Image (cartoon, rainbow, N blue to C red):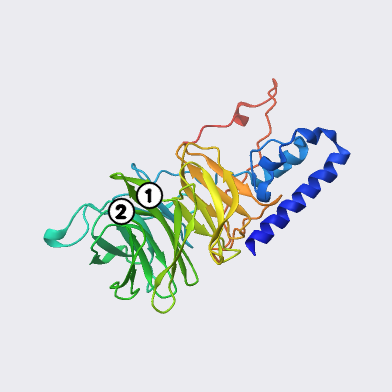
Amino acid sequence: SVLARAEGEQLEVVELLESMLEEDEGLEEWDVGKETAGNWRWSEQNSPYEEEEEEEQMMLTLKTVTNVRSFRSAVNQLLPLPAGVASLSEDAFRIHSRQGIPLLSMHFPHVGAGEDAESAHFTCMEFDPTGTGLLLGGNNKWLTSVDLLTSQVTGSTAVPNAISVMKNTNRYLACAGMEGSVTLRDPNSLTALHTLVAHAGPVTGMDVADNMLVTCGMSMYRGAYNTEPAVKVFDLRRSPRPLASIAVPMGPCLLQFSPKFSSTLLAASPSGAWQLCDVGGLFALPAVYQVPTPGLTAMDISPSGELVVFGDTDGGVFVWSDRRGGTVSLHAHSSFDTVLPDHRAPSSEMVWTEETPLSAAPLPPS
């Protein structure tokens, strides 16, 4: 089980530290319980072994490949595509190549048709399981279909409530609403087939693995919305139904299943605390980790399952790993090689003498 694996890894780390203590007394000041709980490490932690720590940080260092401004307003969601990266704002949708070249740009001043048209206020998007397009949803009562080949809106489906998160499942398109319910729609006609009551307030996080759907959201307390300290689990086999509720005291707002273990769920709270849950056993692991950040806004797990990355409100990115030299598996999402920037060798410094001709001086680009 996941719990046995976590305890086994922690035992191995403790045994390793004990053997290292015999060789170097400087490790006596290392807080074992803080730095090695569950064998997860933050990429910027301090260690008495500076050389080994520098090597580990180099393995986890993130370098900027492309930096391009997509919108004047906030980016609400990113979605990787074989041709590039799709980005969504409250009223626009764009696709850039991984070198930053714009490939597609669409602006939505309004969504809907006729007198029922309203402002877009998009918050989420998901692949259209039946075609070559995307589905856009948000703080409006429309589900907008966009064809990426023709760059046109192919349809708008009326929905009763605003949509906060969308996920594709084996049989349904799951749409989490601002009112706390999850609507399972037919991927072909987009008609509502089932409605699951999840939370009393907006659903802030949702993920799907096989036939298991998990959500986290807000609850009402004394007339105000507060983060609910629980993860709701639903069974999508045959007739979808609620299965159980996993207590997570920190109050999660972000959820994602591990690609390596289908029953392992990572839950993170806005305060930066995150925890692993065993959805198969319906319990949360006791170890709680803390990201040094004023507030988390995004989270993702590498396809290898060895790295976890967090984004915060200050624009920082934090990488955690459960081992030294964790791999990312760059080619998991696409059959094409990942295009990286060209690294040019630095030009040699010119030595000027009285015999150097003026024609040797480089000219500025025209």
Q: How far separated are the C-alphas under marks 2 and 1?
A: 8 Å
State the quadrant of the N terminus.
bottom right
Q: Is residue 256 above or below residue 32?
A: below
Residue at 61% across / 58% down in the picture? 305
The image's mark for residue 122 is 2
Residue 133 lies, in percent from the top left, at 36, 67
Callout 2 touching callout 1 (CB < 8 Å): yes
* Mark 1: amino acid: Asn
Residue situated in front as seen by the camera: 163 or 245 = 245
Residue nearest the observer in this picture, 286 or 187: 286
Q: Outermost residue, right direction?
A: 23
Residue named by callout 1: 76
Q: Is residue 342 visible?
A: no
**The residue under label 2 is which amino acid type?**
Phe
Left or right of 347? Residue 19 is right
Q: Residue furthest front?
A: 222
Residue furthest left in the image: 115
